[in-house]
């Protein structure tokens, strides 16, 4: 291996190391932000009038992101939405079997909720923001800014039909076990966690049916 190849190899290693460090730093900041949001939400919960709490089944928010109720605990997960009309017969029956598997493996109480939820284009906007920051071409910049405006309009005007899984437990240990079963029940029917802010919006909507999800 000559000197040039050695230098290039070392350069790639340094770049990879720097990228890994950046990813770890972003992950650390994300966790710190989530903890801070949890603390803020718990602090806000303490400001709620006692009369309001007396009329609601939900008492408080735990630091782990699920809710304490008068009879135990509850949490909200999301079921990935699938366009079954575009599936072929094999895919359709596989998906039905996956849902059946969820019902068989998760034997505790659950509630499936269907709701029109505002479209989320955060990931696309984040990507476009990076492209805009790097863009030096006036024509391309015009296109990127137009696309960004479209994404923001979609978030404001459009809603998607989303499905959520509400699970219950009598104590924290059972909640952790129930959540693990729900999240790992199968591959085809994807069940995944959502952030606390979205959970609160869902519960707010369920308790105020005439309200709009912001």
Image: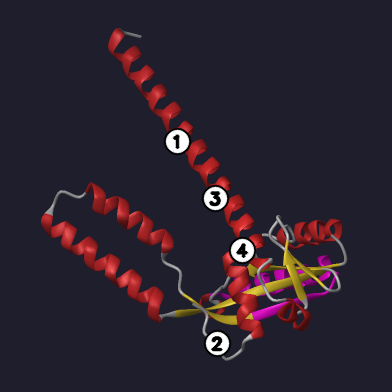
User: Which of the 4 image quarters holds residue 200?
Assistant: bottom right
Tag shown at residue 211: 2
Q: Secondary structure at mark 1?
A: helix
**Residue 193 visible to the viewer:** no
Camera-nearest residue between 49 and 42: 49
Q: Is residue 159 above or below residue 5?
A: below
136 sits left or right of 76 in the view: left
Residue ID at (88%, 66%):
170
Q: Which residue is mark 3?
A: 33
Mark 2 or mark 4: whose residue is earlier in sequence: 4
Q: Which residue is mark 4?
A: 196
Residue ID at (30%, 8%):
3
Cβ–Cβ under 8 Å for marks 3 and 4: no
Cβ–Cβ under 8 Å for marks 2 and 4: no
Residue 33 in percent (x, y) is at: 54, 50
Highlighted range, magenta: 87-113
Mark 3 or mark 2: whose residue is earlier in sequence: 3
Q: Secondary structure at mark 4?
A: helix
Residue 106 in percent (x, y) is at: 81, 67
């Amino acid at each position: 291996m000559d000197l040039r190849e050695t230098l290039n190899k070392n350069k790639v290693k340094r770049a990879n190391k720097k990228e890994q460090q950046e990813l770890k730093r972003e992950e650390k900041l994300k966790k710190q932000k989530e903890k801070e949001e949890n603390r803020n939400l718990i602090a806000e919960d303490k400001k709620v009038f006692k009369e309001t709490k007396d009329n609601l089944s939900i008492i408080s928010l735990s630091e782990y992101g699920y809710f304490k109720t008068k009879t135990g605990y509850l949490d909200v997960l999301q079921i990935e939405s699938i366009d079954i009309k575009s599936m072929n017969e094999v895919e359709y029956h596989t998906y039905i079997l996956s849902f059946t598997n969820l019902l068989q493996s998760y034997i505790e109480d659950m509630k499936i909720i269907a709701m029109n939820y505002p479209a989320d284009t955060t990931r696309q906007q984040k990507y476009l923001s990076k492209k805009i920051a790097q863009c030096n071409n006036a024509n391309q910049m015009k296109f990127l800014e137009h696309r960004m405006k479209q994404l923001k309009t979609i978030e404001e005007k459009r809603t998607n039909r989303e499905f959520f899984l509400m699970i219950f437990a009598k104590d924290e240990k059972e909640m952790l076990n129930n959540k693990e079963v729900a999240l790992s029940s199968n591959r085809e029917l994807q069940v995944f966690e959502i952030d606390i802010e979205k959970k609160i919006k869902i519960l707010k909507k369920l308790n105020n049916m005439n309200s709009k999800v912001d």
